[in-house]
Image (tube, grey):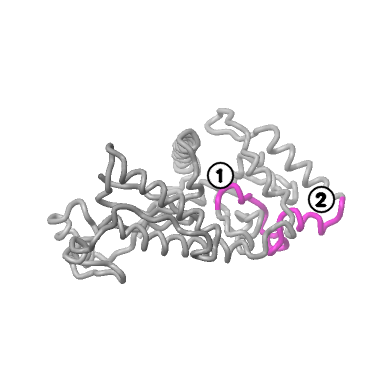
Amino acid sequence: MNIALEPDYGSLSSRAIRKIIKELQKFPENATHAAIAAGYKQRGSETLDEKTSRELLEKLEPLKKGTLRNPVVEKVLNQLITLVNELIASDEFGRPDEIRIELARDLKSGAKERKRKEVAINKARKENEAIRDILTNEFGIKRPSRRDVFRYRCWVEQKHQCLYTGEPLPQDAIINGEEYDLDHIIPRSRMFNDSFANLVLVKRSANQEKDNQTAHDYMAGKGKEALDTFLVRVKSLYDEGSRRKAGQNLKPVSARRKHFPLMKGKDIPQDFIERQLRESQYIVKEAMHLLRQVSREVTTQPTQETTCVTTGTY
């Protein structure tokens, strides 16, 4: 079917959906109960009777140093424990009826930082919607995907030139997947980053030649002159703030976006991926165990980030 769903949609069969929808009419505010009632009990889930009979603690005790033998996990979980205990003890909120464990970048973000991120996300969403309109109306793409949007954004931001060769990128490069690629500046296999900040639109031949190198190492391998030309090209593109949308100037790309083309392979932590995935899994597992001691309904919502926060429903 020619349907382009947004990322993170769930995958259920039509038979399962029909059965769960019937139960959702009985449990409209609790999809987990509806799924269990429909006969789809997930591993580790509880029945309604099991949840209601489970004894809850008045508060969570902080983890002592060395309890989990992982200082990063201990720090995140103790921040989580402090937050949950303050909510339970407050007159305004009290014990949450439900806790959802989500994965986020920074548990310590303050209100101003969270607001800044929210504004940035909303702005990016509007920009992407405008780009989708352009791709549909001008390029004939009926249902532009996330990668279609990224290809267009890279094409505009790079001033229609390949970041590696300096050669012009025709408008056709946006939709031509045979001759032009979205390339990870730092290979995803080495840094587990699939965000727009780590992507460029380049000629496929250059991408294949680059292989599993960082952009910096690839250009350095071509000689000092090629590397110097590349660095000048990067500085020119990003310092001028050449990003445009519908004819309007936008802010220059962030320092983080500029940093990727300059990173050398030797500067990438060798155990980056394994450590992040391991800590993320560990945090979620322990957070589930802790939070089930103070709330009867604890669920997880998977994403691709690395540390956890909670949101309560009262």
Of 134 and 278, which appears nearest the observer? 278
Task: Find numbered disc 2 in the image and state the secondary structure of the residue it sits on.
Answer: helix
Location of residue 93 with respect to 32 vertically, above or below: above
Indicate the amino acid at tag 1: Tyr
Q: Position of residue 202 (x, y in %)?
A: 66, 52
Q: Is residue 32 above or below residue 92?
A: below
Q: Nearer the viewer, residue 28 or 178?
A: 28
Give the residue type at disc 2.
Answer: Leu
> Circle 1 — which element?
helix
Front of the two marks 2 and 1: 2
Q: Which residues are magenta?
A: 195-224
How crowded pointer 1 is (Cα within 10 Å; few <14, some 14-19, many 20+) is rated as many
Q: Residue furthest left?
A: 26
What residue is disc 2 on?
Answer: 227
- Where residue 208 appears, as percent x and y from the top left, is 68, 63
Residue at (70, 49) in percent of width and height: 261
**To which residue does mark 1 refer?**
152
Quarter of the figure that contains the N terminus: bottom left
Q: Could you tell me how far apart the alpha carbons at marks 2 and 1 are, in whole angstroms? A: 26 Å
What percent of the width, then of the height, locates residue 123? 47, 35
200 magenta-colored: yes
Is residue 132 left or right of 202 when viewed as pictured? left
Rendered image quadrant of residue 178: bottom right
Q: Is residue 103 left or right of residue 313?
A: right
Q: Is residue 277 above or below residue 170?
A: below
Q: Is residue 103 visible?
A: yes
Left or right: 90 with respect to 247? left
